[in-house]
Every structure is written in structure tokens, then in C-alpha cells.
Image (spheres, rainbow, N blue to C red):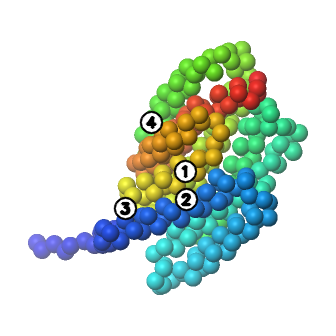
Amino acid sequence: MATVAQSPPSGTMRQPRLARFGLFVFLTFAGFLIFAVTMTFAPFLPLWGNYAVRAGFLVIFAGLWWVARGEHRISPYRPVFFAYFGAVLGPSLGFFFGDWGLRLFCLTIHIPAGIAVTKFSQALLTVIGILAIARLGGENLASLYIRKGRLILGLSVGLIAFATCAVLAFQQPAVKGLGMAKLAPMMPWILLFVASNALMEELVFRGLFLGRYEPLVGKWLAILSTALAFAPAHMQVSYAPDIVGFIAVTLVLAVAWGWLMHKTGSLWGSALFHAGADLLIILPIFRTLGAA
């Protein structure tokens, strides 16, 4: 029986390699620029500057998203414009209004509860903003990797990675010096912090982008692009003594999280893994800040 050749599932294989690589570079730079302005360097900009830059990005991406409807030259990139719009809107809500938890519970950021509640408040607004715009734009949760996927595999890898990171975190000299008597009361706040941050960042940096980049540049370039936007977004951190080494490790982890999200078809495993990695950072920070 004669067979009919099937067309590839996406436009990735039909694109010349050079064009695909050029698109990868452009998407990576665009992602880096968005996160650099709205997250990395946002604390250093004046308030009016933050409003102006974010409003400008939102207008641009909303316009491109609208223009790309139906049959149009830029229509294949409409999902990407949605991702960029969501990546600006969600974190902007957290940036401007994320202190509601502190005000509601009369806390400060100099205690464990205040640090954790602030992160939870920011993450909640960020996630709500992205989910709301996805709903209004006709996007489903599965397109954001908020789905069951290969749940057993994701949870298994995520839990093993979380446990491994936790063991390493508790072996740090600064954490050992704190002592379990002081550390135990902080654990609920530590877990709230890492869970909130991990879920938010996996949604913003990977859930929004992986499935929208892949048809354009392929799986591995999509994973690498999100990692290259994610790692430099942390260049302003003050808790890493060796920022170059920290960015390098973060890049490797970001590739691993992207691969795990793609492999399992959901963000739950990578969020667990991410939360474990955050333990290595937040435990010494609580001690350094005198949070005990």
C-alpha cells in the first residue's frame, strides 16, 4: 500500500537552521530584556520609570498580540506575544502591589514571617495576573504546563531533587551554626517562601514560554532560550559571593528544570526541584539577616 508523507507537527523542521538560530537569538534577547527591566533592575529604577517601562511593554505586546490575529505574516508569533505580555503583567502586579500581605498582617521584612509572606503575596498576584490574562485571551492552563502530565515521574524526580538539596542546605556551616532549636520555628516560613518563589518562577520563566518557543526553534533551543533569560535575571543578587559561578550554576539548573518540565508535560516536578534549590539560598539568608 502506498504511503503518504506526513507533514511535520510544527514549522520547526521546515525552517533553515540559520534562520532558526537567528530566531533563537532574538527570542532569547527579548526575554532577557523583559526580565532585566521588569525584575532584575526594577528596584534601581525610579517609580515613574517602572510605570513607564512596563506600560510601554504592555502596549507594544498587546498591540502585536492583537495585530497577529487570523492570517497574518506575524501570526505564528502570536503565542509568543501573549507570553511576553503575561511575563510583564504578572510580575508587575507583584512588584507594585506585593506588599499587601505585610500590611494585612502588620509584618516587616526583617523577620521570617515577613519575608515569607512578602514572597507569597508577590507570587499570588503574579500567578493570578497570568492566569487571568490567559483566560481572557482564550489560552488554557495546559498551555502553561499547569496540568497533570506525567505526574508520577515529575513528582518522583522533584521530590528526590528537593530532598537532596535539603540535605545539602542543612549541611552548610551557616545553617549548622543556627541550630535546630532556632531553625525549627522558621521552617513553615521557609517552606512557604521556597514554594511560592519556585511556583511563580517556573510559571513566569518556563510555563509561559516553553510551549510557545518550541514550534519556532525546537525543544532544546526553547529550553536553552528560557535558561539564558532566567540565569542573568539573577545577576543583581547580593547573597552570592561569586556571582559568575552563581549564574553558571543557575543556568545549568534552569536547563534541567526546562528539560524536566518538557519531559513530564507539567511544571510540578520542576517547581519541586526549584524549591529545593532555593533552600540552599534562603536558609543562610535567614541567618545572615538575623531573622531568628
Q: Mark number for residue 157?
A: 4
Q: Nearer the viewer, mark 3 or mark 4?
A: 3
Q: How crowded is the residue under tag 4: few (<14 C-alpha within 10 Å), some, or many (20+)?
A: some
CB within 8 Å, label 2 to label 3: no
Q: Amino acid at mark 1?
A: Pro
In which quadrant of the rendered image does the C terminus lie?
A: top right
Q: Mark number for residue 32?
A: 2
> Which residue is nearer to you in this view: 102 or 146?
102
* Residue 53 point in image, percent of width and height: 70, 67
* Mark found first going from the N terminus, 4 or 2: 2
Quarter of the rendering containing residue 8: bottom left
Q: Amino acid at mark 3?
A: Gly
Q: Is residue 46 above or below residue 238?
A: below
Q: Amino acid at mark 4?
A: Val
**Tag count:** 4
CB within 8 Å, label 2 to label 1: yes
Residue under pointer 3: 218
Q: How crowded is the residue under tag 3: few (<14 C-alpha within 10 Å), some, or many (20+)?
A: some
* Mark found first going from the N terminus, 2 or 3: 2
C-alpha separation, residue under disc 4 versus residue under disc 1? 25 Å
The kind of secondary structure element at disc 2 is helix
Q: Residue at x 53, y 39 (%)?
A: 246
Q: Nearer the viewer, mark 4 or mark 1?
A: 1
C-alpha separation, residue under disc 2 versus residue under disc 1? 7 Å
Q: Residue at x 51, y 60 (%)?
A: 209
In which quadrant of the rendered image does the N terminus lie?
A: bottom left
Q: Mark number for residue 232?
A: 1
